[in-house]
Image (cartoon, rainbow, N blue to C red):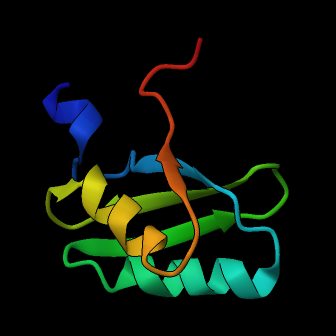
Amino acid sequence: MSLLSDNIIPGNRGKYFETNATSRNDIAKIKEAVLKVPGIKDVIMNEDKFPREFKIHTSSMVAVKDIEDAVLKIGFHAISKSLFEL
């Protein structure tokens, strides 16, 4: 893969993920788990879309795998969305 697809680069752009969580309680758990990953500045949840979507901003470079693993530990999936919309 590449630097951009394997990592979240600091800045205003952030990176989008989709998740299989549906309830507000589950989404709150995901947000809490992701915020514990070092380098995460904020997590913005979008509950209006299905599948649920969240955007992550970082203060330092963070591996996408770290986010996926943090969410997987609490029983859900986080799938990184592509860099460029088709």
From the top left corner, tell me how far across and down residue 8 is, in percent.
27, 49
**Is residue 55 rendered to the left or right of residue 42?**
right
Please identify the quadrant where the N terminus is shown: top left
Q: Is residue 26 above or below residue 58?
A: below
**Foreground pick, 76 / 53:** 76
Q: Is residue 79 above or below residue 34?
A: above
Q: Residue 76 lies in what quarter of the image?
A: bottom right
Which image quadrant is residue 39 in?
bottom left
Tell me where residue 23 appears, x and y as whole percent. Answer: 82, 77
- The image position of residue 51, as x and y in percent, is 76, 49
Q: Foreground residue, 73 or 12?
A: 73
When asked about the image quadrant of residue 10, the answer is bottom left
Q: Quadrant of the C terminus?
A: top right
Image: 54 above or below 18: below
Residue sitting at 39 percent across and 59 percent down?
68
Residue closest to the eye, 11 or 56: 56
